[in-house]
Amino acid sequence: MHVTPSLKQSYVLACDTPIPAWNYLQRGHRVTIALDADAVGAFRRDGSGRTPLDRLTILREDLDDLSGLLDVPLGTTPHTYGELFRFLSSSGVRIVASRDVLRSHGIKPAEMDPVVMVVSGADFKALLQDVDALLPYEEVAVPHHSLFHGGSH
């Protein structure tokens, strides 16, 4: 899944990428979320170690459905999108970013959430070329903010 927009440009990264990633993973596919362009900023940690995704709360009404989908007890269901991406990573979804893109945005690799594997520009390019299916963010997106209920952005 090739993701390029920042959270300010689109909630696609946060809201619409995790569920398809999980679904593909559960069907036995290898899933990589390739962060490119402005999307890298969503995983940049601040001085407290939190990312913008950690500040983006999953809607309360979505938690029951998310708990069922992920097959985890409601008490351990991710409550923020940062927690959701960490859950995906711990379940086998790779999240990668190009060192060249980070550099162009003034981000040091150490500032990134540890779930993000930072690779060379050449390795990132090779990753995008060596896939069975590439899902650009426009194809993953659904026109709503809510994971399940069609709420507005």
Image (cartoon, helix red, strand yellow):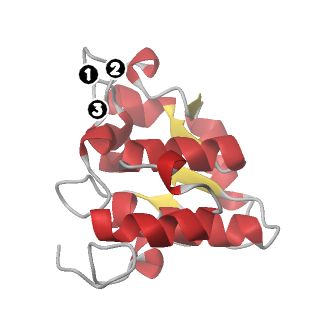
Looking at the image, is mark 1 or mark 3 earlier in the sequence?
1
56 above or below 28? above
Residues at marks 3 and 2, CA–CA distance in whole angstroms: 18 Å
Please say if the residues under marks 1 and 2 sit with CB atoms less than 8 Å apart.
yes
Considering the image in quadrants, where does the C terminus appear? bottom left
Instruction: Residue 146: give x, y in percent of width and height.
Output: 30, 73
Q: In the image shown, does 123 or 110 lie closer to the viewer?
A: 110
Badge 3 element:
loop
Image quadrant in which you'd find residue 63: bottom left
Q: Tell me the kind of residue under disc 1.
A: Asp
- Residue position marked by numbered label 2 in the rendering: 49
Instruction: Residue 75: give x, y in percent of width and height.
Output: 49, 48
18 above or below 152? above
- Point 57% across, 46% down: residue: 87
104 above or below 46? below
Q: In the image shown, does 57 or 137 lie closer to the viewer?
A: 57
The label number, if any, that marks residue 46 in the structure image: 1
Residues at marks 1 and 3, CA–CA distance in whole angstroms: 15 Å
As drawn, the residue found furthest toward the right would be 28
Badge 2 element:
loop
- Residue position marked by numbered label 3 in the rendering: 105
Looking at the image, is mark 3 or mark 2 earlier in the sequence?
2
Q: Tell me the kind of residue under disc 2.
A: Gly
Q: Tell me the kind of residue under disc 3.
A: His
Q: In the image shown, does 121 or 61 lie closer to the viewer?
A: 61
Q: Nearer the observer, disc 1 or disc 3?
A: 1
